[in-house]
Amino acid sequence: MDKLTKKTVITISSIVATTLIGQFLNVEPIGLFYTAITCVIITNVDFEELIKTSKFRAIGTLIGGIMGIIFSYIPLFLILKIIIGEILIILFCEKKLNIPSAIASVVFLIIVYKITPEPSYIYGFKRVFDTFSGIFITLVITYTLKKF
């Protein structure tokens, strides 16, 4: 099987698996969406590269989630939360951890902008859980299919 076909099979299999499992567990559509996005973003035919990408995605989501939850409860103007939070995220991810800051920034902004009526800590937990679920399923499917 060539690389493009393999990547297509892995991506679609991961999305289908997370969607079926999520529907079976009555996961809300937004959770299915974030899990599917994780499958798309991290999928890689090279298993070692997938591990690396998965690690960056997991750490970034965790950092963005924690920072978003913290900053959503700090009584500052929204624009100040965004400026201070983004500076901290970019510096911490890029300088300290040497990982891309984009995913952490996206998760942070979703939480700080309060896109959902849920409390920030619940929403943050759900997004972290969705991401880790997508990573786990994609890793299992990729590992299983890497022999082909």
Image (spheres, helix red, strand yellow):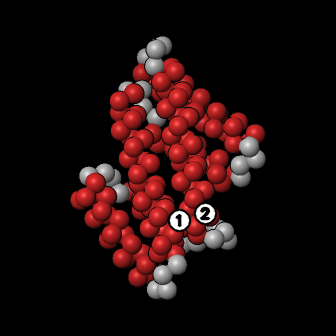
Picture quadrant where residue 101 is located: bottom left
**What residue is pinned by disc 1?**
110
In front: label 2 or label 1: 2
**Which numbered dot is residue 123?**
2
**Residue at (51% x, 69% y) in the render:** 69
Tell me if mark 2 has few (under 14), some (14-19) or many (20+) residues whose alpha carbon lies within 10 angstroms of its own: many
Can you name the residue that lies furthest to the left here? 95
Judged left or right of residue 119, residue 24 is right
Q: Where is 78 relative to 114, above or below?
A: below
Give the residue type at disc 1: Ile
Judged left or right of residue 124, residue 104 is left
Asked if one can make out residue 37 in the rendered structure from this viewpoint, the answer is no
Provide residue 33's location: percent of width, then percent of height: 62, 49
Tell me if mark 1 has few (under 14), some (14-19) or many (20+) residues whose alpha carbon lies within 10 angstroms of its own: some
**Residue at (54% x, 27% y) in the render:** 141
- First of labels 2, 1 by sequence position: 1
Q: Secondary structure at mark 2?
A: helix
Picture quadrant where residue 2 is located: top left
How many angstroms separate mark 2 from mark 1 (CA)? 9 Å
Asked if one can make out residue 24 in the rendered structure from this viewpoint, the answer is yes
Provide residue 142's location: percent of width, then percent of height: 49, 26
Q: Are marks 2 and 1 in contact (CB under 8 Å)?
A: yes
**Which numbered dot is residue 3?**
none
Q: Where is 3 relative to 41, above or below?
A: above
**Residue at (38% x, 56% y) in the render:** 102
Of the pair 8 and 23, the residue shown nearer to us:
23
Give the residue type at disc 2: Tyr
**Residue at (37% x, 76% y) in the render:** 83
